[in-house]
Image (cartoon, rainbow, N blue to C red):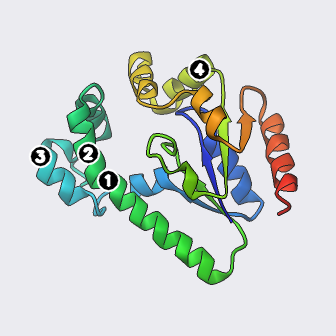
């Protein structure tokens, strides 16, 4: 069984997937893979260098995420160009890892996919768990975590579907506006529901 865990930036997807991992479940995280392929020596670095130039590569050989954010947010053509070289590479790695889980005989695999609805791939999963939270809480979390301005966080959020869209398209909703203990309790309830 493939279960997607999704949600907007700052909603708390990682808190959910960290908890699932701590309970021994396999989690494939698309964001982590995206960071790996844009790290020094990553598969997407040659593409980024060819299409955006050396200015977007840090001295250590990784993609300059701050500079890239400034370039692509608010510029749909540049964003599409970036996604062409990164999203497809992420999808290939995810598919390889799902195959490995199937070959190993795993009964369930959780896939953390932030842009699940944006990419139109929600129908590829047996269940979709969406993590939602109050927008102001999300903005504050991301500003503290990533040291971004409120304006940049709002730009990122504007490129993502709303929680209303997530609610309508998900099999289950996890509300992460409360405490970590409350979040864990909701995840435990869903694990019981799906009998893992």
For disc 3, the neighbor class at 10 Å (few under 14, some 14 to 19, many from 20) is few
Image quarter (top left, top right, bottom left or bottom right) of the C terminus? bottom right
Q: Nearer the viewer, mark 2 or mark 3?
A: 2
Q: Earlier in the sequence, mark 1 or mark 4?
A: 1
Image quarter (top left, top right, bottom left or bottom right) of the N terminus? bottom right
- Tell me if residue 189 comes above or below residue 157 in the rendering: below
In three-dimensional space, the C-alpha distance between marks 2 and 1, rounded to whole angstroms, equals 6 Å
Q: Is residue 30 visible?
A: yes
Q: Are marks 4 and 2 in contact (CB under 8 Å)?
A: no
Q: Earlier in the sequence, mark 1 or mark 3?
A: 3
Q: Which is more toward the observer, 29 or 105?
A: 105
In three-dimensional space, the C-alpha distance between marks 4 and 2, rounded to whole angstroms, equals 26 Å
Q: Earlier in the sequence, mark 4 or mark 2?
A: 2
Residue located beneath label 3 in the image: 53
Q: Which is more toward the observer, 94 or 179?
A: 94
- Tell me if residue 34 comes above or below residue 99 in the rendering: above
Q: Residue at x 21, y 37 (%)?
A: 78
The quadrant holding residue 20 is bottom right
Mark 3: secondary structure: loop
Question: Mark number for residue 86?
Answer: 1
Question: Mark number for residue 82?
Answer: 2
Q: Which is more toward the observer, 170 or 97?
A: 170
Q: Earlier in the sequence, mark 2 or mark 3?
A: 3
Q: Nearer the viewer, mark 1 or mark 3?
A: 1
In three-dimensional space, the C-alpha distance between marks 1 and 4, rounded to whole angstroms, equals 27 Å
Q: x, y percentage for residue 82?
A: 26, 45
Q: x, y percentage for residue 5?
A: 63, 48
Question: Mark number for residue 135?
Answer: 4
């Amino acid at each position: 069984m493939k279960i997607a865990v999704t949600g907007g930036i700052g909603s708390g997807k990682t808190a959910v997937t960290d908890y699932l991992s701590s309970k021994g479940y396999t989690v494939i995280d698309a964001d982590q893979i995206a960071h790996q392929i844009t790290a020094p020596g990553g598969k997407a670095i040659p593409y980024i260098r060819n299409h955006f130039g050396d200015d977007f590569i840090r001295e250590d050989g990784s993609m300059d995420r701050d500079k890239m954010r400034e370039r692509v947010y608010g510029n749909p053509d540049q964003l599409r160009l970036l996604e062409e070289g990164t999203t497809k590479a992420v999808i290939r790695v995810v598919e390889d890892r799902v195959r490995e889980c199937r070959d190993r005989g795993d009964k369930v695999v959780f896939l953390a996919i932030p842009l699940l609805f944006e990419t139109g791939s929600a129908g590829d999963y047996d269940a979709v768990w969406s993590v939602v939270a109050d927008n102001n809480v999300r903005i504050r979390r991301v500003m503290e975590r990533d040291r971004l301005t409120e304006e940049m966080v709002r730009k990122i959020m504007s490129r993502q579907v709303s929680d209303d869209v997530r609610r309508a398209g998900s099999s289950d909703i996890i509300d992460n506006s409360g405490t970590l203990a409350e979040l864990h309790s909701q995840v435990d309830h869903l694990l019981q529901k799906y009998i893992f």
